[in-house]
Image (cartoon, rainbow, N blue to C red):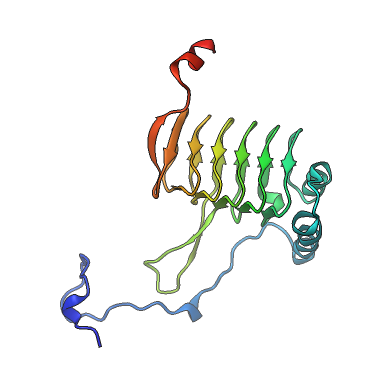
Amino acid sequence: MRDATLIPQSPSSRTAGQPTPSVDLSRFEGGFDRGAGRLKEAAWLAASLIIFRALPLCASGLKARILRLFGARVGTGAVIKPGVKITFPWRLTLGDNVWLGEDCWILNLAPVIVGDNVCISQRAMLCTGNHDYRDPAFALVTRPIRVRDGVWIGAAAFVGPGITLHRNAVLSACSMATTDLQADTVYRGVPAEPVRDRWPAQVADRW
C-alpha cells in the first residue's frame, strides 16, 4: 500500500475529511447528436472499410465521390491515400487540393473544416472529442476543428478539440496542438510551441 504522504496533493476547495469524488464509467451516457441515422452510419462504415482502408490504390477520385455521397463537402484535386479514417463524412469539409496521407484519422464528432492546399500527413489525428475529467460520469465534450488554407500537419501529429490552425501554419511531425496555431509559423513539441517563421525573408519578399 502506498504511503498517502507520497501522493501529490492538488489544490482543492474541499474541506478536510470530505470524501473525494470517484469516476463511475457506468454512469457515462455517451449520447450526442451523430448527425445521421443508424442505416446511413452503417453504410458509411462499410464503404469506409472497403474503399478507404482496404483498397490498396489511392483512388482519390472515387473516394471523393463517396465522401460527397455521404454528405461531405469536397473541393477539386483531393489526394486521399490508403488507410484514411474519417468518422462522420457529413461533418467534413475539404477545400481544393487537400492531401490526406496514409492512415491519418479525422475523428470528427464535431465539424472539421479544412481549407485549400492543406496537407495532413500520414498517421496524423484530428480529434474533436474529449471527456470532462471533472465529471464523475466522464461526460463527452465535442468541439470543432478549423484548418485554414496552406496548413501542413506533419506525420503522427495531433490536433485537439476546438483548435484553429491559421493560414500557412506548420505543425511538425509528432507534435501536439493544444492551442490555436498562428499564421505563417512553424510549431513543434508536446505541447506545440512556435519555433520559427515559415517563410525565409527572401521567399516572403517574392510574394
**Count of picture labels:** 0
Q: Give the quarter of the image for residue 118.
A: top right
Closer to us: 144 or 202? 202
Residue at left offset 79%, top offset 43%: 60
Quarter of the figure that contains the C terminus: top right
Q: In the rendered view, would you say 23 is above or below 72?
A: below
Q: Give the quarter of the image for residue 2.
A: bottom left
Left or right? Give the position of 60 relative to 114. right
Closer to us: 42 or 97? 97
Residue at left offset 43%, top offset 38%: 187
Residue at left offset 38%, top offset 36%: 194
Residue 111 image position (x, y, % from top left)? 61, 48
Left or right? Give the position of 78 relative to 12. right
Residue at the extreme bottom: 1
Q: In the rendered view, would you say 116 is above or below 41?
A: above
Residue 52 image position (x, y, % from top left)? 76, 54
Closer to us: 145 or 39? 145
